[in-house]
Amino acid sequence: MSTMTIAWLVIYFSSWVASAFNPLFGLLGYLFEYYLRPSLHWWGQGLPDFRWNFAIALVLIVTFVLRRSSLPELKHVTNPALKWILPLAALTLLVTPIAADIDRSFAKSVEFQKIVVIYMLIIGVVRSRRAFDAVAAIHMAGAGWWGYEQWLDPKRVASRLDHVGSADTLGDNEAAAHLLTVLPLIFVYLLAIKDKRLRLLALTTAPFVVNLFILCNSRGGTVGLVVGALAALLLAKKGHRLRMIAALPVITIAFFALADPEFISRQQTTTNYDEQGTAVERFESWQGGLSLIRDHPFGAGGDGYEVLSSEYIPAVVARNQGEERAPHNTFVLVTADWGVLGLICYLGLIGSTFLMLHKVRRSSIGDDSMFYRALALQVGLIATLTASTFSDRLYGESFYWMCALAVALYRIQHSLPATSTASQPESRPGALPVSFRWGAEHA
């Protein structure tokens, strides 16, 4: 057994034990397993075929239920996104009996239910700025590790990465969309957060994450990055915009210094989409999706678009040796599989999440750290949603992590006046030892 395997097992099972003291450690363990899934790495091939992600998620659920009272108390705040994400989860079950393939639809419904559970757990566990920072740190470090692995040994096919990331990011487009939720956090912790440990982590991971993004060579991802950068300029505080604009040429030069000729060559084709076979195929797939939606307004069920792709996009399927095809557009995917009501719920989730982040930024008078944490989430969501227009990210976990962290930040801010460090209560009987009090402070 390799040293890496032993180290992974020690960290993984330590998160089990630590979660019994503070469920935040269970959440960090879940993210750790997501980024270093044994079955996807050479050092994990000797480990038993065990559902490591399910096991740590179960530990997190149990310890959260049992140790919930040990977490910091927050004021009750209504989460407007719940009235959208829960109906969407219910809708996946209601549509399944009429799905094009009931078994596959049920599997996709279960997959979405799991995502909703993690979404709820993140909101329940992340109750302080320190807890938020701990989750952000794992997110940055995990993406940085992926970048380090690909820097050591990149495996590219047709100028793009062939195998990267975790279960929901193994494709280059999916991995690039995932990284768009990481990059804004890296730059915010590098430039706007005073914690030197987090700044050092951001500085260390930045070149590896940027290099990984370049290796993905995703045109949709690059469009998302550009849109995210423009959103950051528009949403930043007025006094900081000039500094960001001044820094933009330096960042751009550094970005293209890492870029190789293959990346530049592929990205140049973005403006010539009408001459690119893959782009034309996407338009055909979207048009086929619209026809499917007209015929199945209540949805064709999970994987319904793929099951019916030979009927609605026969030319595209024929060009790909008869393989089922996906729409390569998350919004078409949502509507085709879960119907118009599904799209309404999905858009409602996005809109309510953005509304909460807007309120956090607007209320962060004199508190740049809260403002820029919210900004990082909002820019990350804008960028990944843009990239999702060219890829299928309905079941991509990082999007829902950002949505859940937005709710957590919203709740934390509402509780700040009553739980600032200046007015924290004395330790009560049964309180956690200091070494396990991650996230117990709000300032």
Image (tube, rainbow, N blue to C red):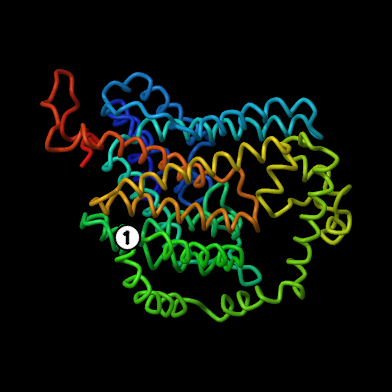
Identity, as a three-letter code, of the amino acid under mark 1 = Ala
- Determine whether, in the image, residue 282 is placed left or right of residue 220: right
The residue where tag 1 is placed is 202
Q: Is residue 240 left or right of residue 59?
A: left
Residue 261, x across and y down, in percent: 56, 81
Q: Quarter of the image containing the C terminus?
A: top left
Q: Residue at x 38, y 74 (%)?
A: 245
Picture mark count: 1
212 or 359, nearer to the observer: 359
Residue 378: percent from left, percent from top? 44, 52
Left or right, residue 88 beside residue 125: right
Mark 1 neighbour class, 10 Å CA radius: few under 14, some 14 to 19, many 20 or more:
many
From this view, report whether residue 294 is shown above or below residue 73: below
Q: Nearer the viewer, residue 207 or 252?
A: 252
Left or right, residue 261 beside residue 292: left
> Residue 242 occupies which quadrant of the picture?
bottom left
Q: Residue at x 31, y 66 (%)?
A: 240
